[in-house]
Image (cartoon, grey):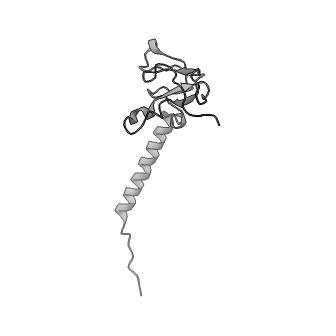
Amino acid sequence: MEWDRSCTDIFCCIVFLAFLVAMLGVSGYAINNGDPMNIIAPFDSVGNQCGKTKQGVDYAEVNVTDFTEYKFKHFTRLIEGTSSNPALLYNAVCVKACPVKGQSDYECKTNAHEQSCPLSYYDTEV
């Protein structure tokens, strides 16, 4: 008994090869032009990266700020950010060291959402 065999999935094979080529192209572009640290780096609520130099809200030379010493992110309005005002949950500043509960004299970089370093309502110590 002879079996009459032939390739039946030529179209699927071509689509799969095209996918592989596209995946390699996108990966190559991302490796050459991307910054993988942006995935794990903390940002304050207006987009400044904590721990990085030469940043500003509008990135103009007039408003450039150095965030090198402020490496940690502190969420400032978690208690107030309830279901009535969930936008406050994302308010954050870059700080030199994590504040403890009740501390208001910690060093932070203020931004458009936080005009001063607010009182810390929760423990951030490990």
Rendered position, 59 above or below 120 = above
- 11 and 37: which is toward the camera: 37
What residue is at 61 percent from the left and 30 percent from the top?
100
Residue 74 % position (x, y): 54, 30
In the rendered image, the residue lying farthest to the front is 102
Q: Is residue 111 above or below residue 91?
A: above
Depth check, front residue: 6 or 60:
60
Name the residue located 41 percent from the left edge and 19 percent from the top edge: 58
Residue 56, x across and y down, in percent: 46, 19
On the rendered image, what quadrant is the N terminus found in? bottom left
The one of 52 and 126 positioned closer to us in this rendering:
126
User: Is 98 in front, or is 27?
Assistant: 98
Q: Residue furthest left?
A: 11
Q: Position of residue 50 (x, y in %)?
A: 54, 27
Please identify the residue farthest to the top as the structure is shown.
Answer: 62
Q: Quadrant of the C terminus?
A: top right
